[in-house]
Amino acid sequence: MVAAVLCEQLVRIHRSGTTEVQALQGLDLRVEPGEVVAVVGASGSGKSTLLNVLAGTDAPSAGRATVAGHELAGMTAGQRVRYRREVVGVVFQQAARNLLPHLTAEQNVGLPMALAGTGRRERAARTRELLGVLGVAGVAERRPAQSSGGEQQRVALAVALANRPAVLLADEPTGELDTTSSREVLAALSTASTELGTTVLVVTHDPGVSEQVARTVAIRDGRTSSEVLRRTEVDDDGAARLVSEEFAVLDRAGRVQLPREHREALELAHRVRLALEADHIAVRPADRPGR
Ligand code: ADP
Ligand code: MG
């Protein structure tokens, strides 16, 4: 199966004047079609850079990034325009950046379809379907300024989904919203996944988002460092309970990031001793060979 998102040793360097910032430092990530994945991490850890690379607005400096089989490095300008219009849908934190202010909600949703050459009748039907599924049919004829922030973000989701993208990319879509509106936008995101089958990659600070998805990937210093997987288990009495487990990410070069608490507890620095045991690998301070 072709991965919805595949990043291998992805590097992105931002240059401004004489300074260089390595925002992504060899990031590995694979997302399967239909998955909903939350990306979390401190400010400056490279989350937006990752999304911008996948959105086709920022080019990889090294390594690989592919979305639904489309290789992002080396696209021509024309391919990039079509990629952005047809392969991905993007929602940003600032509602104002997602919608054209002088168009109504339904005109905003119709626009990407018109640009892709979709006929008028199909456009109207798809617009009605999307606004309905996302719970904003009531604002179809309003301009952005005449609806709430939460409604604007749900219309923005409809715009992003209009051309049936392989992947929906959302960068802190609830960042400027109150709790109630955030919940509505989240519900809309999960509807996009369950009813429309869209793969979703959402960057968030909001624990309310990351706790609702099956998989949360943490980025630290431009690399994926750990993942939390959640699933529902049914115990012997038939009661369902949510199980969540945290894993460290092992990259293709064999690197693992040891959590700071673990390093500090054993004063691990610079060098450690590794020993292969029957069913695990032991990591010890260099001055304590063990056994
Ligand atoms: P996040 O979204 O996790 O807060 P970003 O991807 O925005 O992180 O930024 C990662 C790093 O790259 C930060 O150190 C940031 O200052 C830097 N950076 C991001 N965009 C640019 C840019 N256009 N020019 C220079 N540095 C940038
Ligand atoms: Mg950001």
Image (tube, rainbow, N blue to C red):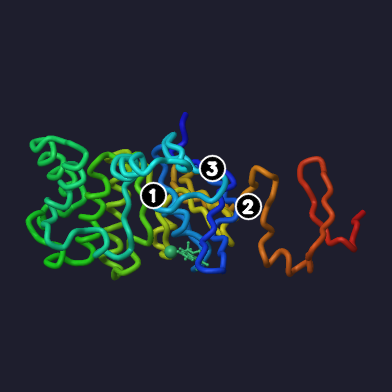
What residue lies at 18% left-to-right and 59% top-to-bottom? 100
> Looking at the image, do the residues carrying marks 3 and 1 touch, with CB atoms under 8 Å apart?
no
Q: Residue furthest top?
A: 1
Q: Which mark is residue 272?
A: none
The circle on residue 64 is 3
Measuring 44% from the left and 46% from the top, which residue is drawn there?
239
Q: What residue type is labelled 1?
A: Ala
Pointer 1 residue: 55
Which x, y percent locates residue 121? 8, 36
Under mark 3, the amino acid is: Arg
Which secondary structure, mark 1?
A: loop
Q: Between marks 3 and 2, how big is the CA–CA gap? A: 22 Å
Residue 152 lies left or right of residue 238; in this view the side is: left
Q: Alpha-carbon distance for marks 3 and 1?
A: 14 Å
- Of labels 1 and 2, earlier in sequence is 1
Foreground pick, 173 / 189: 173
- Check disc 3: other Cα within 10 Å, few if <14, some if 14-19, many if 20+: some
Q: What kind of residue is marked 2? A: Ala
Q: Which of marks 1 and 2 is in front?
A: 1
Q: Which of 202 and 206 is in front in this view?
A: 202
Q: Residue at x 68, y 52 (%)?
A: 256
Image quarter (top left, top right, bottom left or bottom right) of the C terminus = bottom right
- Picture disc at residue 248: 2
